[in-house]
Amino acid sequence: HPNIVGHYIKSLEYYEKLSAYSKSNGDIIAASYCYIKIGDIYSKRDKNIEALTYNLKAYQILSELKNYKRTCTLSKNIANLYYENKDLDSSLIFFQFSEKWCEPYQTQNWQIYKSQMKIYLDLGEIEKISSLNHKIIHLNVGDEFQISYFALLEQIGHFLKHNYHFDE
């Protein structure tokens, strides 16, 4: 719909101007938030390369400022964008960064581990699957985690059955 596209363009123009204004006034945190918004707009339009460009700009600023909460979320988003672009190595690197940034927020780790496991399963990395599974076993984040972990174990079992001919 042309009207929606026009709104995206206006939003991009607005956040571009606001980020430039914020940077010129020394407010790099505001600029980084604008970059995140621009990245979100591009992501919604399935323009992942552009989304990555702006998210990486924001990541550079927020990680230098040691803004753990925002960088935790942002690093997971970047990892997911790399995954969508089939760049699994970069995705794994940013999921590792996510572990560091999300350390104060332990409940965030489950989503990170689940995504990492999906990549390891996609790649067929048996040793990494086993290592990550061992790490997950030692976590305990309540009942929701336990149910999700069971579902993940089913995925691992399915992978092993189809790739290595084990019985489930």
Image (cartoon, rainbow, N blue to C red):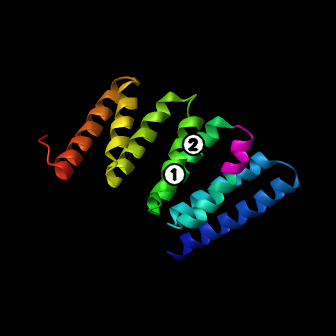
- Is 142 situated left or right of 7 in this image? left
Q: Amino acid at mark 2?
A: Phe
From this viewpoint, which residue is outermost toward the left?
A: 167
Report which residue position mark 1 lands on. 79
Residue matched to label 2: 97
Viewed as shown, does residue 25 lie left or right of 10?
right
Query: Is tag 2's residue or tag 1's residue first in the polypeptide sequence?
Result: 1
Of helix, strand and loop, which one carries label 2? Answer: helix
Whole-number angstrom distance, CA of label 2 to CA of label 1: 9 Å
Crowd rating for badge 1 (residues with CA inside 10 Å; few <14, some 14–19, many 20+): many
Q: Is residue 29 above or below residue 84?
A: above
Image position of 113 (left or right of 6): left
Closer to us: 5 or 143: 143
**What's drawn in magenta, residue-wise?**
59-66
Identified by mark 1, the residue type is Ala
Secondary structure, magenta segment, majority class: helix
Q: Are marks 2 and 1 in contact (CB under 8 Å)?
A: yes
Q: Say which quarter of the image contains residue 157.
A: top left
